Amino acid sequence: MSGSFEPTERTLFRRRRDRGSYDEDLINRILDASAIGHVGYTVDGLPVVTPVAYWRSGDRLFWHTSSASRMCEARDGGLPVCITVSQLDGFVLGRAGMSHSLLYRSAMIFGRASLIDEPREKQRAMSIFIDRFFPGRSREIRPPDEAELGKITVLSMAIEEASAKIRDGGVADSDRDCQLSYWAGVIPVRTVVGEIIPDPNLPAGTPIPDNLGSYVENASLSDVLRALGSNQA
Amino acid sequence: MSGSFEPTERTLFRRRRDRGSYDEDLINRILDASAIGHVGYTVDGLPVVTPVAYWRSGDRLFWHTSSASRMCEARDGGLPVCITVSQLDGFVLGRAGMSHSLLYRSAMIFGRASLIDEPREKQRAMSIFIDRFFPGRSREIRPPDEAELGKITVLSMAIEEASAKIRDGGVADSDRDCQLSYWAGVIPVRTVVGEIIPDPNLPAGTPIPDNLGSYVENASLSDVLRALGSNQA
């Protein structure tokens, strides 16, 4: 059963409500379709936005960052953050200046982030991260030793407030503008998987593991990641 | 002549200095290769990150947002913001847990944003926006009327502090890890242009305008946008 997030002061749509949603399934689908998120936090009251590798597990988000990041300074009750995940899907070119826009899907998540400190918990989070993108791979690599675990920083937070915004479809010109003789249309954009490049240090003929089978050349990365994410959830 | 930004308290690389840069040309190349940026600002002291359509003109950034956004509340001396632009280029799978990472290019920009209020200035900014992506198109569409201009919100700021971070290349396993029999390699990812979709309301046979000629199917969007950006600069 899918739920819905309550609109809050921060997530209330003030305009274009038709493009906004609080639906949990939809928000999770957007989160599961990307690998880079943008984490906003404050340092001395001023905003900083850092790109991070993130992943979702149930109603929690996790991400990696540099252990030297000021994101890692401990704060009572957790660090207030906003993580936003966006995917560009294209350009809309209308007959009027006003009807030009981007096609996109985005999710905006608010919560309070905490560091995962305990080494075994950190290692578990890291295995989940690797397996989320490459199922079962955490058992097919050398696990981190204690010194390495000390260099990894993982943050985690419950999704407290969330909303999604989507602009899809095509040109939205008025009937009157449609009479104008200007060209209008959509330029779609998609993020696709390239051809896998084995490390040159591998013995010749080493096969690509089966658990990378989803990463088919020219497949939509969003589709691949979303399918892997829902297998795991 | 290209310059370099001074490292500041906020942009100083505390780790992995080999992946960081303050080079102005490199930062501009990253900015010019994307269309969506993530703007961080604070509301009541808490961070908010909003995806925006942005563009660069010289040493200034511009972006659109909803006029209902709390980003638009006037603040003396401008709204302190951090705009981060990132492009995912792939996944790195090493033989060890620690040698898994993302390939990416990102730029982090700090400044103080102001609203563009004056209608003619707003219209000029909007024309630059359209022409930046579709050269000359602002003269081939219906310009916005006064009521429409009232609904557009454009913010602008000088780039005050800036840094770039790039992870490229391949697997970085130690010599010792390279002896392990696990598979390692890179899964490249790229954002590409799709086939242009003319609006169904166009008269049959209407040709696609020449100024969309860069948007060739399967072309790298980063390459297309960067070339269009440098033509214009």
Image (tube, coloured by chain):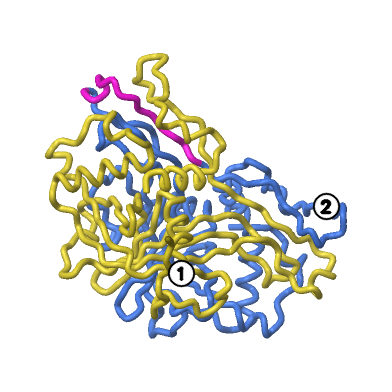
Chain colours: A blue, B yellow
Is B127 situated above or below B202? below
Please provide percent x and percent y for residue A65. 52, 73
Q: Quadrant of residue B210?
A: top left
Q: Relative to the observer, which residue lies in front, A62 or A48?
A: A48
Magenta-tinted stretch: A176-189
**Of the numbered discs in the image, which one, if any, rests on residue B225?**
none
According to the picture, the residue beneath numbered tag 2 turns out to be A207
Direction top: furthest residue: B204
Q: Amino acid at mark 2?
A: Pro
Please report the residue visible at 31 percent of the width from the left and 75 percent of the height from the top: A46
Direction right: furthest residue: A204
Is A225 situated above or below B7? above
Q: Quadrant of residue A55?
A: bottom right
According to the picture, the residue beneath numbered tag 1 turns out to be B22
Q: Relative to the observer, which residue lies in front, A85 or A102?
A: A102
Q: Amino acid at mark 1?
A: Tyr
Please provide percent x and percent y for residue A42. 35, 75
Q: Relative to the observer, which residue lies in front, B97 or A57?
A: B97
